[in-house]
Image (spheres, helix red, strand yellow):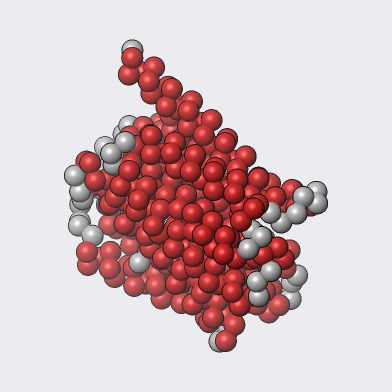
Amino acid sequence: MGGFAIGTTEFSAMSLLPYFSKALGIDAPTAGHVISAYALGVVVGAPTIAVVGARLPRRTLLMGLMLVFALGNLASALAPSYRWMLAFRFLSGLPHGAYFGVASLVAASMVEQHRRTQAVARMFTGLTVATVVGVPVAYAIGEYIGWRWGFALVAVLAIATVALVWRFVPSTPADRTSSPLRELGALRRPQVWLTLGVGAIGFGGIFAVYTYLATTLVAVTGVSASVVPFVLAIFGAGMFGGTLVCAWAADRALMPAAGATLAWTLVCLLLYHVAAQSIWTMAPICFLIGTGIGLGTIMQTRLMDVAGDAQTLAAALNHSAFNTANALGPLLAGFALAAGFGWTSVGWVGAALAVGGLVIWAISWKMDSRIAAA
């Protein structure tokens, strides 16, 4: 439920942009800063909250984070101006990364060692289901009732999450040995940085395509605007399936699964240019590209393995990397579009980012081999 709420607000804000930009009296490019403000909140909030809240009981921390998330989205629904909207979206983004990081640790702690990634993946399915169900519902609410109700819906989902966490998440005592300095110790570990690099670069290709998918479908594939939501749902279905399959593979061979996922994503992105010419090839390739999102759960478990006793910060930083990719992919794809390479060039940009992720992954795996040999 928490992942569903977060995914709904993160992705639906893009579809609600035309409505709140008009209501707040700003143009679309300026309204795009509202999206960036949320992402900035994620990047800033994930490490800060993880360090400060490391000694709190995890159930208490999860409930507190969701309460702040509910407050930020309710405030967004009531925002009277563009500047207030910026502030409230930044506030909404602050709990995002820390929530997923702590929830991942809780999920992993409730199962056997060899099922950790699958437990984390089940928690993440809320995020992927949001792309199939939550985003279209929020878009419909924005179109037929009003954009403010789209953000209010997320606030209701967040309150429901607080109740569910209180009811179902086991109460465990706080780790009194934890401290901000111990958590910051994760940043001294090269493997932590390499893992974050894989996510920040390797993930970027998926976002490069997803951001401009609607326009590509209309301008290149030649479908009507009414078909776009169905293809976006197909993309989301790929995310859902990929999250579960990649987690299953990672629990058997984590680093090989990460490399295979990146290589798979690279091949799919290379086919995007050709597939975009017809809806009958575009829909399947969107599903297949979407499966690459499963890399997120693999990297989450990888961070648990390399972070030592600084688990909370490392787990939260995975979502800072994720949102870095969310900014980097569209930015580089935008440069290609501005240079006149055409809408399908985003696939080539995405492929280049996947190659970058593979290079960092290879360095990390090689370092593991050297340590094991020593």
Quadrant position of the C terminus in the picture: top left
Residue 96 position (above or below residue 370): below
Image location of residue 252, percent across then percent down: 28, 39
Residue furthest to the top in view is 374
What is the count of numbered marks? 0
Residue drawn at point x = 42 percent, y = 27 percent = 365
Quadrant position of the N terminus in the picture: bottom left
Image location of residue 178, percent across then percent down: 30, 39
Residue 264 position (above or below residue 96): above
Residue furthest to the bottom in view is 145
Residue 273 seen in render:
yes
Residue drawn at point x = 64 percent, y = 75 percent = 225
Left or right of residue 10, residue 311 in this image: left
Image location of residue 237, percent across then percent down: 44, 63
Q: Nearer the viewer, residue 94 or 267?
A: 267
Residue 35 position (above or below residue 19): above
Residue 67 seen in render:
no
Image location of residue 112, percent across then percent down: 19, 44
Q: Nearer the viewer, residue 215 or 14?
A: 215
Residue drawn at point x = 41 percent, y = 53 percent = 242
Left or right of residue 214, residue 173 in this image: left
Residue 347 position (above or below residue 304): below
Residue drawn at point x = 47 percent, y = 32 percent = 361
